[in-house]
Image: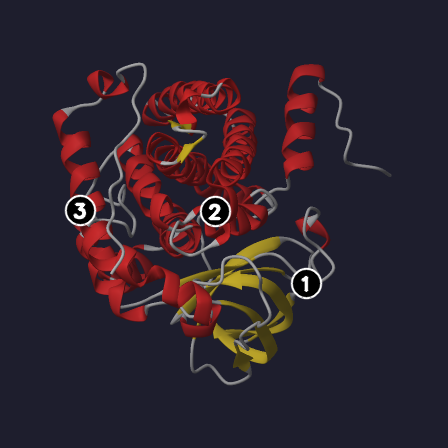
Amino acid sequence: MKTDLYIHPDYYNMDSMLSEEHKLIREATRSWVKKEVVPIIDENYENATFPNHIIPGLGEVGAFGPYIPEKYGGPGLDQISYGLIMQELERCDSGLRSTASVQSSLVMYPIYSWGSEEQKEKYLPKLATGEMIGCFGLTEPDFGSNPGGMLSNYKDSGDHVVLNGSKMWISNAPFADIAVVWAKNEDGRIHGLIVERGMEGFSTPEMHGKLSLRASATGELIFDNVKVPKTNILPGKSGLGAPLKCLDSARYGIAWGTLGAAMDCYDQALRYSKERTQFGTPIASFQLIQKKLAEMITEITKAQLLTLRLGQLRNEGKATSAQISMAKRNNCEIALNIAREARQIHGAMGITDEYSIMRHMANLESVITYEGTHDIHLLITGMDVTGIPAFKKE
């Protein structure tokens, strides 16, 4: 069984800026991950399976809807706590964080923010414990970076609507109990609907052949004349801004999560460089290895500062979508670069499952693209500083 020797890198003493509660939450999540997930994650990754038996544990550590109030079954934590939990999950595996991130930011968040009181009471407590798992239906086969072009639609039919269309690349879809689906009404206005497993005409075929995020379940959502009660439509907000607000929350979690993957790769590379000898000396004594390690910890420290400040802004309700995009893009990039450099330091050992580096690297190739591609997030920053959108063409 693999031994988890991880030591949290903290070059600028960032822990002094966290509360005792923050540190306790992080430690509780880290301990659970080390005990329950680290020993099995390689096997699940290799077999392309998600370890469903850990779902109750994710609920117990508060990974599902950390910021959801206790009234609705959540732990009522702040945004920094949410980030720290995501960091510890992705320190293990991006697929693990994806599962929790979707449940929290893309399912529970919209129900809590724009759902009716009845919807909140019906779904949120069960989602918080993991008794119920959800997924988020926005991306379509032909509409990724341009979600407003979606074709999924519904028509009024008395006390229910009839939903048709499809969604693709949906995390948690194969085993989700509900899906928060975004579709256009007859006026072309986008609304969120809660579609439940078992509704006639609703299917969730699993997607196979992934070479990344193999330890998470990905599927499609197919709607063939699905009758959805009107009481399942989210009443509080409509328009494309609604799902984009969900993505803000998820991207914020990704910024923390990918930093966890980067820290894990750095920690392994630092330890290996001190243990591995060549020419009669540890390779950590060589200038080029020290250059790699110094650059890694520098980028990690910069990302830690960026992410913590973003968390403070989120707590104050002041973080902008563009600021979240910057953090998501930056942290995905530095994490992927650090994984690649850590692989170099490990030499041939870096491609084996004795270390998590190659798994992180493959996972991050997906994370850098989903929920806004690397280039789209760059253009969001460009639009924010110039006032001119470069990705919308008439």
Q: Residue at x 33, y 35 (%)?
A: 275
Q: Position of residue 194 (x, y in %)?
A: 45, 65
Q: Is residue 391 left or right of residue 147?
A: right
Quadrant in which the N terminus is drawn: bottom left
Quadrant in which the C terminus is drawn: top right
Q: Is residue 235 left or right of residue 203?
A: left
* Mark 3, residue position: 31
Q: Amino acid at mark 1?
A: Glu
Numbered tag placed on residue 350 in the rendering: 2
Q: Position of residue 241 (x, y in %)?
A: 57, 41
Vertical side of 99 occupied by 275: above or below: above
Q: Amino acid at mark 2?
A: Gly
> What is the C-alpha distance between the residues marked 3 and 2?
25 Å
Mark 3 vs 1, N-terminal side: 3
Vertical side of 276 occupied by 13: above or below: above
* Mark 1, residue position: 186
> What is the C-alpha distance between the residues marked 1 and 2?
54 Å
Q: Secondary structure at mark 2?
A: helix
Q: Nearer the viewer, residue 129 or 308?
A: 308
Q: Position of residue 212 (x, y in %)?
A: 54, 57
Mark 2 nearby-residue class (10 Å; few <14, some 14–19, many ≥20): many
Q: Nearer the viewer, residue 361 or 331?
A: 361
Residue extending furthest toward the front: 280
